[in-house]
């Protein structure tokens, strides 16, 4: 009887320790790493003076995006953490001969809220709602000389689902994807056309102009203390 009671106490302590990972008063140190690539082709038709098609040339455009955002949060109630992330994001779009290489490099602020739903002591689903404010430098050689390098501003509002695996009480390995996503980007162009503004809304993947691919999976590691 005593042996069975001791076993139950040990098991209860193990379960309590694991559940306490996301309990009220705990701190969350996490981060996301996003890498994506997108390739598109543009066809140009060449005609003679009579309007007859002579040839077609195809140009490949490749967009890549990279982001790394460390985040710090606090569990205000069980399974619900509020926090802030500060990180870097950048993307590059270029054609196959690198003659028109567009780049944007930004510092991003990312307030967020995250809610966990436990499956068992090792696996939990979570949903993260947040928005990113980015400020950076935008380079486009297609603009006039005085406007090729400009300040840029971005807004990203998202609701992202994820999955966390807990190999230990203080560490989880996470995989998340884009869920609902809205993006806005603004940069100066030239004195004639004014500012360049781009807005996009997507479900599952973000705008191809930013270089994000399907679902844009992000791998993260979280620490709980």
Image: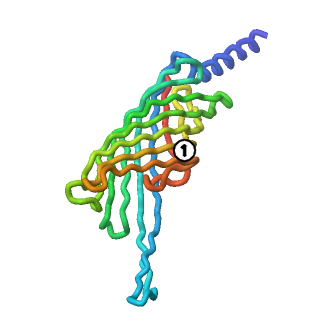
| Figure quadrant of the N terminus | top right
How many numbered marks are there?
1
Mark 1 is surrounded, within 10 Å at the Cα level, by few (under 14), some (14 to 19) or many (20 or more) other residues, namely many
Q: Mark 1 points at which residue?
A: 178
Residue 147, position as x, y percentages in the image: 24, 54
Please determine whether, in this image, residue 172 is positioned above or below residue 176: above
Q: Is residue 147 left or right of residue 175?
A: left
Please determine whether, in this image, residue 182 is positioned above or below residue 26: below
Quarter occupied by residue 97: bottom left
The figure's colour scheme reads: rainbow
Q: Extreme top residue here? A: 2
Residue 168, position as x, y percentages in the image: 56, 29
Q: Extreme right residue here? A: 1
Q: Element at badge 1?
A: loop
Residue at the spot x=52%, y=20% of the render?
75
Residue 77, position as x, y percentages in the image: 57, 18
Q: In this view, does 48 lie to the left or right of 168?
A: left
Q: Is residue 34 left or right of residue 164?
A: left
Residue 207, position as x, y percentages in the image: 48, 52
Quarter occupied by residue 59: bottom left
Residue at the spot x=42%, y=78% of the render?
57
Q: Extreme front residue here? A: 192
Q: Extreme bottom residue here? A: 50
Q: Which one is nearer the viewer's eye here, 54 or 80?
A: 54
Residue at the spot x=36%, y=46% of the render?
186
Please determine whether, in this image, residue 145 is positioned above or below residue 112: below
């Amino acid at each position: 009887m005593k042996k069975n009671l001791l076993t139950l106490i040990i098991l209860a302590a193990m379960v309590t320790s694991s559940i306490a990972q996301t309990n009220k008063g705990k701190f969350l140190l996490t981060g996301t790493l996003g890498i994506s690539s997108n390739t598109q082709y543009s066809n140009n038709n060449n005609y003679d003076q009579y309007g007859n098609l002579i040839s077609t040339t195809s140009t490949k455009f490749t967009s890549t995006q990279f982001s790394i955002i460390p985040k710090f949060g606090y569990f205000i109630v069980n399974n619900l953490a509020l926090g802030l992330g500060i990180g870097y994001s950048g993307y590059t779009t270029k054609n196959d001969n690198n003659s028109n290489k567009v780049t944007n490099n930004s510092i991003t602020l990312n307030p967020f809220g995250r809610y966990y739903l436990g499956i068992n002591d090792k696996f939990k689903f979570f949903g993260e709602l947040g928005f990113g404010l980015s400020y950076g430098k935008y380079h486009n050689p297609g603009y006039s000389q005085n406007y090729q390098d400009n300040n840029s501003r971005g807004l990203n509002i998202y609701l992202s689902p994820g999955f966390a695996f807990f190999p230990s009480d203080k560490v989880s390995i996470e995989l998340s994807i884009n869920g609902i996503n809205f993006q806005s980007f603004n940069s100066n162009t030239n004195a004639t056309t004014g500012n360049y503004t781009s807005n996009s809304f997507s479900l599952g993947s973000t705008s191809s102009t930013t270089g994000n691919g399907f679902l844009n999976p992000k791998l993260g590691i979280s620490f709980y203390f």
